[in-house]
Image (spheres, rainbow, N blue to C red):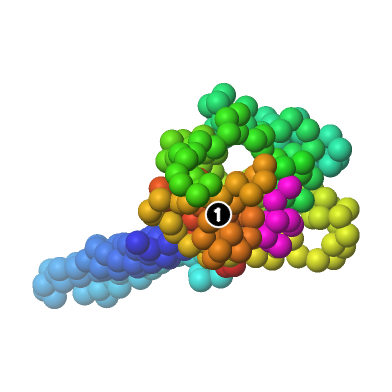
């Protein structure tokens, strides 16, 4: 499809052609409509009247037709208007970082319009907690104290087996469904739009924790890369309980970073959904 500039050029070319054709047609019609030269008067016989000189007809000046003055002049190339790009909308004015929770929560409500998802978010210092969470995740760590979302209301379920081993009950995967929906309901473009909107405040919060002048986007990419490198466990997951906390019985799984262990505890279906969404976000961040 031609752009607007091409359409305008084609329009002016057609108009110019029509004007040239019109001028030629008017000139052709007027050339057959000249004033005729009068015929000479009859000469009387010499015997009857004295011969008089034949009067010469007075010259008739043909009218000059200024066709170009009567018709609109075709625009010259310099006169053809050029299409101007539409101005970009002004960026919204952001509040101070300490007062940003109201705007962030309003955007969350507007984006999701699902109370059960809105209830998953913490109610204060959302931008700061997001920044600290990403910074920790980039290093493989998790701290619930600085998470932008609340913890699941129910604990994990296990099935006891021999030798003080347990199997992670697949029913436990469901407690993460709302969190996965929170992350996958919004398309990638919307997520990036919100990220770009609050980026100045995100950078400010990042500097507050000691990263002055450094790139937060790289920390976010590092955290995503760790999550994408998490292996998929589709069979049963065995646990041990040497203390009050369950651990993976498989040493390779237990050696993974906390952010990766969290993905495995979500179950393979939820893990694949989160990883697919993260991969799309990563592609946009590295453009």
Residue 182 visible in the picture? no
Q: Nearer the viewer, residue 44 or 68?
A: 68
Q: Quarter of the image for the C terminus: give it.
A: bottom right
Q: Position of residue 206 (x, y in %)?
A: 81, 55
Horizontal side of 160 relative to 222 (left or right) equals left
Q: Position of residue 83 (x, y in %)?
A: 54, 59
Q: Position of residue 205 (x, y in %)?
A: 82, 50
Q: Which residue is most to the front?
A: 163
Q: Which residue is most to the top?
A: 115
Please say if 269 is above or below 49. above
Q: Which quadrant of the structure image shows residue 183?
A: top right
Residues drawn in magenta: 135-143
Tell me if residue 136 is in the magenta stretch.
Answer: yes
Residue at image point 76% right, 44% down? 146
Crowd band around label 1 with a 10 angstrom C-alpha radius: few (<14), some (14–19), many (20+): many
Please say if 184 is above or below 171. below
Residue at image point 55% right, 54% down? 248
Residue, disc 1 = 248
Q: Nearer the viewer, residue 28 or 185?
A: 185
């Amino acid at each position: 499809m031609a752009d607007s500039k091409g359409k305008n050029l084609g329009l002016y070319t057609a108009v110019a052609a029509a004007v040239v054709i019109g001028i030629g047609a008017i000139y052709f019609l007027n050339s057959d409509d000249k004033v005729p030269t009068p015929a000479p008067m009859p000469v009387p016989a010499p015997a009857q009247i004295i011969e008089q000189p034949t009067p010469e007809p007075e010259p008739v000046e043909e009218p000059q037709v200024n066709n170009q003055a009567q018709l609109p002049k075709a625009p010259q190339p310099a006169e053809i208007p050029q299409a101007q790009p539409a101005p970009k909308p002004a960026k919204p004015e952001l509040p101070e970082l300490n007062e940003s929770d109201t705007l962030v929560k309003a955007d969350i409500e507007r984006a999701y319009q699902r109370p059960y998802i809105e209830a998953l978010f913490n109610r204060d210092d959302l931008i700061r907690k997001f920044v600290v969470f990403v910074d920790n995740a980039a290093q493989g760590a998790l701290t619930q104290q600085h998470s932008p979302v609340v913890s699941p209301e129910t604990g994990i379920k296990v099935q006891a087996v021999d030798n003080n081993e347990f199997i992670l009950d697949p029913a436990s995967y469901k407690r993460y469904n709302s969190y996965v929906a929170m992350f996958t309901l919004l398309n990638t473009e919307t997520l990036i739009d919100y990220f770009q909107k609050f980026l100045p405040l995100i950078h400010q919060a990042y500097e507050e924790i000691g990263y002055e002048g450094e790139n937060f986007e790289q920390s976010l990419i590092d955290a995503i890369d760790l999550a994408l490198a998490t292996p998929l466990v589709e069979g049963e997951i065995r646990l041990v309980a040497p203390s009050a906390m369950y651990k993976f019985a498989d040493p390779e799984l237990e050696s993974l970073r906390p952010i990766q262990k969290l993905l495995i505890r979500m179950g393979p279906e939820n893990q694949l959904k989160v990883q697919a969404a993260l991969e799309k976000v990563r592609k946009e961040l590295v453009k």
